[in-house]
Amino acid sequence: YAGKQAGTVISERLHKMLVNDYKAVPIVVQENASVYDAIVTLFLEDVGTLYVVNQKGYLAGVVSRKDLLRASLGNKGLEGIPVSIIMTRMPNIVTCAPEESLFMAAKKLIDFQIDSLPVVRPAEEDSRQSELIGRVTKTTIARAFVELGSEPFL
Ligand code: ADP
């Protein structure tokens, strides 16, 4: 193997894996959707986290499985509670950019102890708003990990 350590080759490959090439489609609900609707969407789309968008379609918040479970405990009438009152909202959302490395995204998942990151870019008409273009989850990272491990390096 032409003078290069196998570890160096793997490391170089790892840091060249970009969010844009591995991101999945984001599953969204509107801000005025009910907690009930969000739970139904979670099952229908088979995801663990939903992104909440405002009327212009920009990222407004995140609702996780546990956010929905918490809201359901001791609450009847989940049709009457909007997700916007239980979501984690901007600017407290940890995001990643499409040109970021998958490694950096994985580090954010670990550091912030969360399951998913919205992939965003600044909206063209208003750079303070985030246009949602994908999602990176622990599944995304596991898939990339397996892909990396399946490559013939030497
Ligand atoms: P769960 O709550 O189902 O274990 P997470 O660990 O992803 O799922 O979420 C933990 C908490 O962090 C939830 O309250 C959720 O709203 C919030 N959260 C999830 N993803 C993000 C994110 N990308 N940025 C900020 N907060 C997040």
Image: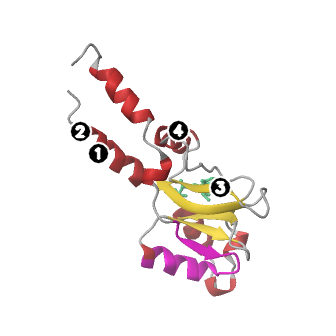
Q: Amino acid at mark 2?
A: Glu
User: Which residue occupies 24% across, 16% down?
Assistant: 2
- Ligand 1, image quadrant it occupies: bottom right
The single residue placed furthest to the front in the displayed view is 2
Q: Nearer the viewer, mark 1 or mark 3?
A: 3
Q: Identify the secondary structure beneath mark 3.
A: strand
Query: Which quadrant of the view contains residue 62?
Result: bottom right
- Residue that badge 1 annotates: 147
**Dot 2, how many residues are within 10 Å of its Cα: few (below 14), some (14-19), or many (20+)?**
few
Query: Which quadrant of the view contains residue 16?
Result: top left
Is the CB of the residue bearing disc 3 within 8 angstroms of ligand 1? no
Sequence-first tag of 1 and 4? 4
Q: Quadrant of the C terminus?
A: top left
How did the renderer colour the structure? secondary structure
- What is the spatial separation of the Cα atoms under label 1 and label 3, in whole angstroms? 26 Å
Instruction: Check if mark 1's residue and mark 2's residue have beta carbons within 8 Å.
Output: yes
Magenta stretch bounds: 26-44
- What is the spatial separation of the Cα atoms under label 1 and label 4, in whole angstroms? 17 Å
Question: Could you tell me residue 27's position as x and y percent?
Answer: 52, 70
- Residue that badge 3 annotates: 121
Instruction: Check if mark 1's residue and mark 3's residue have beta carbons within 8 Å.
Output: no
User: Which residue occupies 48% across, 65% down?
Assistant: 25
Horizontal side of residue 83 vs 149, given as left or right = right
Question: Could you tell me residue 12's position as x and y percent?
Answer: 39, 28
Q: Is residue 100 visible?
A: yes
Instruction: Check if mark 3's residue and mark 4's residue have beta carbons within 8 Å.
Output: no
Where is 109 relative to 124, above or below?
above
